């Protein structure tokens, strides 16, 4: 950021070229982490009967509909 200021950049240019590239990876990482937590919580709540995406999983599991169950759970199963 000091280099942008020293080169005569306006405050907007300093933020865009100095601050944003440093902060953006952290912002995206936290956003993706919170998104994963929300999806997982919704699935768990749905499985126990509170609605959400887990309801789909529970319905297909109760019906023993294996192809539909495999289609509705890739986001939950595809974790390292």
Image: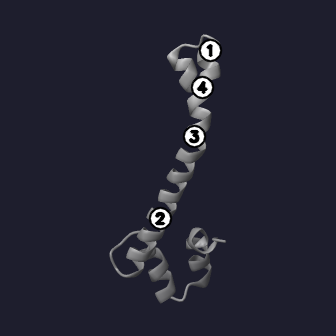
Around disc 2, counting alpha carbons within 10 Å, would you say few (fewer than 14), some (14 to 19), or many (20 or more)?
Answer: few
- SS for tag 4? loop
Task: Tell me the residue at 44%/63% (across/down).
Answer: 38
Q: Name the residue under label 4.
A: 1
Which of the marked residues, 2 or 4, is nearer the chain's N terminus?
A: 4
Instruction: Find out whether the residues at labels 2 and 1 contact each other: C-beta distance under 8 Å.
Output: no
* For marks 2 and 1 on the same chain, the one whose residue lies earlier in the sequence: 1
User: Is residue 14 rendered to the left or right of residue 44?
Assistant: right
Regarding mark 2 in the picture, which secondary structure is present there?
Answer: helix
Q: Is 79 in front, or is 23?
A: 23
Please rate how many residues cluster around mark 3, counting C-alpha atoms within 10 Å: few if below 14, some from 14 to 19, many from 20. few
Mark nearer the viewer, 3 or 2? 3
The local secondary structure at tag 3 comes to helix
| Quarter containing the N terminus | top right
Quarter of the image for the C terminus: give it.
Answer: bottom right
Foreground mark, 2 or 4, reads 4
Residue under numbered circle 1? 6
Horizontal and vertical percent for residue 33?
A: 52, 58
- Distance, label 3 to label 1, CA atoms, is 23 Å
Between disc 3 and disc 1, the foreground one is 1
> Can residue 71 be seen in the rendering of this structure?
yes
Disc on res. 37? 2
Q: Distance between the residues labelled 3 and 2?
A: 20 Å
Residue 15 in the image: above or below residue 40: above
Residue, disc 3: 24
Q: Which percent across, then down, holds residue 58? A: 45, 82
């Amino acid at each position: 950021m000091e280099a942008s200021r020293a080169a005569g950049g306006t405050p907007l240019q300093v933020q865009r070229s100095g601050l944003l590239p440093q902060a953006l990876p952290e912002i995206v990482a936290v956003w993706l982490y919170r998104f994963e937590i929300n999806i997982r919580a919704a699935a768990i709540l749905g499985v126990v009967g509170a609605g959400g995406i887990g309801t789909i999983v529970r319905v297909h599991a109760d019906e023993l509909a294996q192809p539909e169950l495999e289609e509705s759970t890739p986001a939950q199963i595809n974790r390292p």
